[in-house]
Image (cartoon, rainbow, N blue to C red):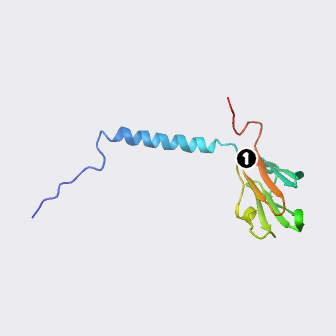
Amino acid sequence: MAEFKERQVFTRRELPVLALLALGALGLLLWLRAVPSGRTAVLEVEGAEIARRELSALSGPESLKITGANGVELEVEFSPEGARVASAACPDKTCQRTGLLTKAGECAVCLPGRVVLKLEGGDEPDAQTY
C-alpha cells in the first residue's frame, strides 16, 4: 500500500508572486472605478439636441417619448444610474439592446430613426493625445 505525502498548497517562494497578483488585481479594480462616470445624458435627433439631463440631479427614473426620422418612436429613460433606450419601434432594436449607459463616452444609436443617446462626463477629458 502506497503512502500519500501531504503537500503544501503554497510554498514560501510562491507567496510574493501571489501578493503581487493580488496587488495588481486591486490596482486594476481601483483604476476601473476611477473611469469617469457619465454625468450628463444628451439626446439628439438628426444632429439636433432634443434633451439634456444631468443624471446626478435626478431623484428617480424619468421617461421621455420621442419620434425620430422616418416616424420611428423611441422611449428613453434617464435615471441617476444612467440612461437607456427603454423601447424602440425600429426593426433591429440595436439601440434598445445596448442597455444602460453608465460611463462617459458610451452611446446608443438608432440608425433608422437617426437618434443618438450619449453620455458626457464632467470637465475631465475622456482621452488625451500628446
Q: Quadrant of residue 123?
A: top right
Which residue is the site of mark 1? Answer: 105
Image coordinates of residue 2 in percent, x first then y, are 11, 61
Identify the residue at horizontal 71%, vertical 40% (top origin).
Answer: 126
Image coordinates of residue 66 in percent, x first then y, are 88, 63
Q: Is residue 27 visible?
A: yes
Q: Quadrant of the C terminus?
A: top right
Image coordinates of residue 22 in percent, x first then y, are 45, 43
In screen coordinates, is 19 left or right of 50? Answer: left
Amino acid, disc 1: Gly
Identify the residue at horizontal 56%, vertical 45% (top origin).
Answer: 29
Identify the residue at horizontal 54%, vertical 43% (top origin).
Answer: 28
Image coordinates of residue 105 in percent, x first then y, are 73, 47
**Up/down of 64 relative to 29, above or below:** below
Task: Specify few, some or many for label 1: CA neighbours under 10 Å numbering under 14, 14-19, or 20 or more.
Answer: some
Most foreground residue, 6 or 119: 119
Q: Is residue 67 visible?
A: no
Most foreground residue, 93 or 7: 93
In screen coordinates, is 66 left or right of 23? Answer: right
Most foreground residue, 101 or 111: 111
**Up/down of 49 relative to 2, above or below:** above
> Please, what secondary structure does the residue beneath circle 1 have?
loop
Q: Quadrant of the N terminus?
A: bottom left
Most foreground residue, 126 or 46: 46
In the picture as drawn, the residue positioned furthest to the top comes out as 130
**Up/down of 76 relative to 89, above or below:** above
**Up/down of 108 relative to 18, above or below:** below
Identify the residue at horizontal 86%, vertical 67% (top origin).
Answer: 73
